[in-house]
Image (cartoon, rainbow, N blue to C red):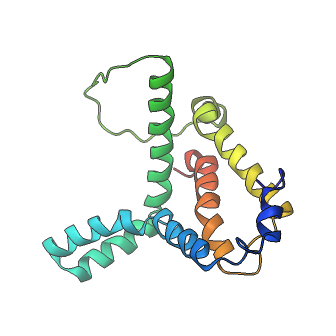
């Protein structure tokens, strides 16, 4: 939208520019993107079972353990393979009976395993964010700019660096 001139038209059109309803819609969308509505059921469940102080402590510990980075990466893997399944035909889950395994992998192996599903898409999002940062003009001075782009920066960074982090 930035490179096509649509953003310039939005900024020059007085009916759209500085529209409070548009800003409120974007701000509420960013709250959902931040995951607050996704975290709320978990905090409520733990809070009802063990108490809200314990739920808050568990939530803070999860954030310190970078659980949000891991689950963002995991959702990227699921989305990639769901998309491939829809495009190229069905697949079946075949349980192996093995548990969760943590092992050291070389950079080349990590790149080979995650290049199409995460690295390419993460780099595309990163390049688009940089283009928006350089050429975009809307909401530059407001705090709304931070809320709109923060979740996308988090997604790109998670997809690019999570395999090496974990």
**Quadrant position of residue 132:** bottom right
**Quadrant position of residue 114:** top right
Q: In the image shown, does 122 or 70 lie closer to the viewer?
A: 122
Q: In the image shown, does 68 or 153 lie closer to the viewer?
A: 153
Q: In the image shown, does 33 or 25 lie closer to the viewer?
A: 25
The residue positioned 44% from the left and 16% from the top of the image is 89
The residue furthest top is 89
**Quadrant position of residue 122:** top right
Percent position of residue 138, x then y: 76, 70
Percent position of residue 63, x then y: 44, 68
Percent position of residue 130, x then y: 79, 57
Looking at the image, is 97 positioned above or below residue 121? above
Percent position of residue 116, x then y: 62, 31
| Badge count | 0
Q: In the image shown, does 19 or 44 lie closer to the viewer?
A: 19
The residue positioned 23% from the left and 71% from the top of the image is 44
The residue positioned 57% from the left and 30% from the top of the image is 113
The residue positioned 18% from the left and 79% from the top of the image is 51
Residue 62 as seen in the image, left or right of residue 129: left
The residue furthest front is 15
């Amino acid at each position: 939208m930035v490179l096509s001139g649509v953003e310039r038209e939005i900024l020059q059109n007085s009916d759209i520019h500085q529209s409070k309803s548009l800003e409120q819609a974007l701000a509420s969308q960013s709250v959902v993107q931040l995951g607050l509505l996704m975290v709320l059921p978990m905090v409520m469940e733990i809070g009802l079972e063990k108490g809200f102080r314990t739920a808050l402590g568990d939530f803070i510990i999860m954030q310190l353990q970078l659980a949000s980075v891991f689950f963002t990466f995991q959702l990227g893997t699921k989305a990639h393979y769901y998309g491939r399944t829809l495009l190229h035909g069905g697949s079946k889950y075949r349980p192996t009976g093995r548990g969760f395994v943590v092992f050291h992998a070389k950079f080349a192996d990590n790149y080979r395993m995650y290049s199409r599903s995460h690295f390419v898409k993460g780099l595309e999002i990163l390049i688009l964010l940089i283009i928006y940062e350089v050429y975009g003009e809307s909401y530059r001075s407001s705090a709304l700019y931070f809320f709109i782009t923060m979740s996308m920066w988090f997604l790109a960074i998670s997809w690019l660096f999570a395999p090496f982090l974990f």
